[in-house]
Image (spheres, helix red, strand yellow):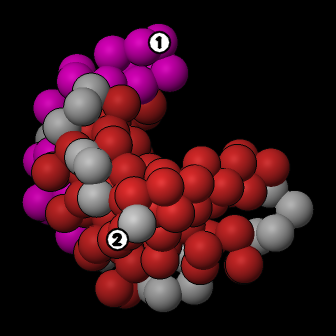
Amino acid sequence: MDLLAEYRRATMFFETGDPTGAARLLEPIVEAEPTNTSVRQLLARAYFHSAQLGRAEEQLRVLVDRDPSDHYAHHVLGRTLERVGRAPEALRHLRIAAAMHSENDDYQAALRRVETKVGGAR
């Protein structure tokens, strides 16, 4: 299997709105190249966008464990946890992402949204 060609196909699937198709192509690539951060990140995003949130969480936790300074992985992990109704747990990751990349409006908006949920739930 030509991993680069398959990664490019998966990227095309993802970009054209087929995250499930992208995930199917990316799974064997991650298996063959488990330390490839770019492939794992795209797989996590494909899972997130296809509402395979448990799988997205697994991939994102690997990314965060390997590189705790990966603000994007923290952000998407926080969004994933928010979507599954675990706002208090999401808050930690969204705060980390927002602190590391404070100029990102999406990060700030997600953080405010979850802070409101958590604050309102108390």
In the displayed orientation, state which residue is furthest to the right. Answer: 103
Q: Is residue 115 above or below residue 97?
A: above
Give the x, y percent position of residue 61.
29, 72
Q: Is residue 52 visible?
A: yes
**Residue bounds of the magenta highlight:** 12-34
Q: Is residue 76 above or below residue 20?
A: below
Q: Is residue 109 left or right of residue 84?
A: right
Disc 1 element: loop
Main SS of the magenta part reads: helix
Q: Which residue is mark 1?
A: 16
Q: Are marks 1 and 2 in contact (CB under 8 Å)?
A: no
Disc 2 element: helix
How far apart are labels 1 and 2 at the CA level?
Answer: 32 Å
Q: Nearer the viewer, residue 5 or 59?
A: 59
Q: Is residue 13 above or below residue 34?
A: above
Question: Which image quadrant: the N terminus?
Answer: top left
Q: Looking at the rendering, which quadrant does residue 86 occupy?
A: bottom left
Q: Which mark is residue 89?
A: 2
Q: Looking at the rendering, which quadrant does residue 25 occupy?
A: top left
Q: Is residue 72 left or right of residue 121?
A: right
Mark 1 or 2: in front is 2
**72 in magenta:** no
Question: Which image quadrant: the C terminus?
Answer: bottom left
**How crowded is the residue under tag 1: few (<14 C-alpha within 10 Å), some, or many (20+)?**
few
Q: Which mark is residue 81?
A: none
Give the x, y percent position of residue 109.
70, 48
